[in-house]
Amino acid sequence: MSDLEHKQAIHALTCRYAQAVDRRDFPRLADLFTPDARLTGPGFCMDGPQAIAEGMSALGKYSATQHHMHQQLVELDGDAATGETYCVANHLYEQDGVQRKLDWGIRYQDRFERWQGRWRIAARELVVDWTQDLPLRGA
């Protein structure tokens, strides 16, 4: 594979992550991580694919989420890579009878590894740069 093909495969991996989270497909989510993976963020740390999948099930408190993946920079180093991926994550919920939307501006700080012939997430740090929480109109 060329460097471009590896970078495309890594980008597809990050899109599959967003899709699995938004569809609450936790077995598929777990399969995107290496066996010793770690996911960290504000106030949480999860070790291993199963713990990550179980931890992400906390998103069930939202009626829906959409993770929009944006620009991504990746540096390849053989069967390893590091990267930064920008994301805006929308979280829909109800509070006091009002539909609301919580948005997070996220930068994922990632380490990827080729494991069993596929790129997977070995470490992901979720950095929240900003948030906004607004009533949802037109729901």
Image (cartoon, rainbow, N blue to C red):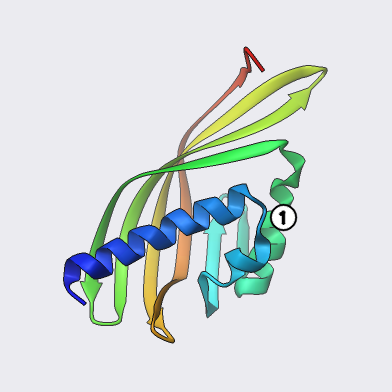
Which residue is identified by label 1?
Answer: 57
- In the image, taking residue 28 as reference, residue 10 lies left or right, namely left
In this view, the residue in front, 97 or 23, is: 23
* Residue 61 position (above or below residue 3): above
Identify the element where label 1 is drawn: helix
The quadrant in which the C terminus is found is: top right
Name the amino acid, label 1: Ser
Q: Is residue 49 left or right of residue 97?
A: left
Q: Quadrant of residue 46?
A: bottom right
Relative to 112, say whether 70 is above or below: above
Residue at 57% x, 49% y: name it: 42
Q: Is residue 2 left or right of residue 67?
A: left
Residue located farthest toward the right when viewing the structure as drawn:
96
Q: Position of residue 94 (x, y in %)?
A: 76, 25
Image position of 95 with respect to 129: above or below: above
Q: Quadrant of the N terminus?
A: bottom left
Badge 1: residue crowd in 10 Å (few <14, some 14–19, many ≥20): some
Instruction: Please provide percent x and percent y for residue 63.
Output: 72, 36
Residue at 46% in and 69% down? 123
Q: Is residue 135 above or below residue 132?
A: above
Residue at x 54% of width, y 63% of height: 39
